[in-house]
Image (cartoon, helix red, strand yellow):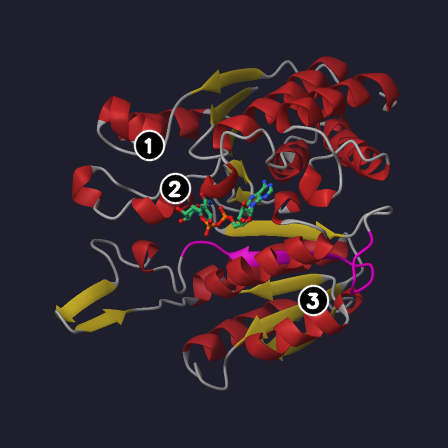
Amino acid sequence: MRILVLPGDGIGPEITAATLEVLHGVSARFGLDLELIEDVVGHASLARHGATVREELLSKAADSAGIILGPTATFEFKDAARGEINPSMYFRKRLDLFANIRPSRTYPNLPSPIGDFDLVIARENTEGFYADRNMAEGNAEILVTPEVAISLRRITRAASDRIARAAFELAMTRRKRVTIVHKANVLKVTDGLFIDSCQRIAADYPDVTVDAELIDAMVAHIVRKPSRFDVILTTNMYGDILSDLTAELAGSLGLGASVNHGIDHGMAQASHGSAPDIAGKDIANPFSLILSTGLLLGWLGLKHASTPLMAAAKAIDIAVEGAVAEGETTRDIGGTFGTADVGRRLARRISATVPA
Ligand code: NAD
């Protein structure tokens, strides 16, 4: 099974190296026989190939069972004509990775000021406020005059239906509760369509309790009582913003994990950015990308009905929980270890303590 590894910018190479330690560890432990191939995106690709991502890489990604994408310096990529393309958008759009699944939970020994919680954000990934993926051609952000700019938001029934189904399927494996998050008091037509799609899909899942919250109130509800929530189903931008909040409430953005998937392809990706403020210092928390890789293995395990892949995914979760409990972490969550050391120790923990 081939996995394409793309380290990215800023802290990307550091957290990817730690992730690879762990991936080699679980591959050996569970006999996964993974073939890891590395390539470049972001600034490294711009320097080497004249573009932050390239068509050839898309074929490599499509031919791989899964992708691990490190964070990239997307804010610096302004001009697609000069090869400055957002790699995250590129893979999500071109491989139709419509679901972005972002779990957040608290850990024993890492107390949260707002109490324990365990929730998952199911975020639509291919349209919404993201103008760079809304059009068949061109970009949905338009400079009408030098002083007037417009950004178009696309919401479709098809995209809403499929993220809703992914969210309800997920809820069936958890506490069977879905909260739809929207802003239909203002965006009556677009978010109205999103809610209508979600409620129609909900009819297929009578065992799941469904409620809905406005995005602004939702922020308060999460901070007030996050344990209320199980699966949060929402559009692209709201999901992006809420998931930074939930990761940080769990302890750190460095715990923000996610998997992007469609029908055929899956991509592990931390939910944070390239963190230039801490890049190159060996202090970035690699758990975000390591846990994302665990989610990818779990998704592949379900897709291929593979017990070893499922066991590897679980082993990563258990090992991270153990590392947090014993303080083998980076300093953002109270530890004293460097990024590389945390990866090495986690790989050892998996080989030594997790039953196969
Ligand atoms: P960021 O998410 O990179 O960082 C926000 C804060 O969280 C910073 O203080 C950072 O040090 C901290 N942080 C992030 N990841 C951490 C980790 N693993 N361990 C410990 N601390 C961590 O947001 P930003 O600074 O606004 O963005 C930096 C760049 O990343 C920008 O170019 C932005 O466009 C890009 N970005 C990329 C992605 C992506 O590739 N998926 C996502 C978001 C932002």
Are the two marked residues, 2 and 1, in contact with CB atoms closer than 8 angstroms? yes
Using the rendered view, name the quadrant where residue 8 is placed: top left
Within 10 Å of disc 3 (Cα), the crowding (few <14, some 14-19, many 20+) is: many
Within 10 Å of disc 2 (Cα), the crowding (few <14, some 14-19, many 20+) is: some
Q: Find residue 349 and report its horizontal and vertical position in percent.
A: 81, 22
Q: What residue did someone put label 1 on?
A: 43
Mark 2 or 3, closer to the camera: 2
Q: Disc 3, ligand 1: is the CB inside 8 Å?
A: no
Asked whether, in this view, residue 353 is left or right of residue 312, the answer is right
Q: Which tag, 2 or 3, sits closer to the chain's start?
A: 2
Q: Which tag, 3 or 1, sits closer to the chain's start?
A: 1
Q: Disc 2, ligand 1: is the CB inside 8 Å?
A: yes
Residue at point 62%, 25% (across, down):
18
Tag shown at residue 178: 3
Q: Which tag, 2 or 1, sits closer to the chain's start?
A: 1
Q: What residue did someone put label 2 on?
A: 73
Question: Observer-nearest residue: 129 or 275?
Answer: 275
SS under mark 2: loop
Mark 3 or 1, closer to the camera: 1
What's under tag 2, amino acid-wise? Ala
Using the rendered view, name the quadrant where residue 83 is placed: top left
Q: Disc 1, ligand 1: is the CB inside 8 Å?
A: no
What's under tag 1, amino acid-wise? His
**What range of the chain is rendered magenta?**
111-126
- Label 3 and label 1: CA atoms lie apart by 39 Å
What's under tag 3, amino acid-wise? Val
- Label 2 and label 3: CA atoms lie apart by 33 Å
Looking at this view, name the residue that lies furthest to the left. 145
Asked whether, in this view, residue 153 is left or right of residue 12, the answer is left
Residue 274 visible somewhere in the drawing: no
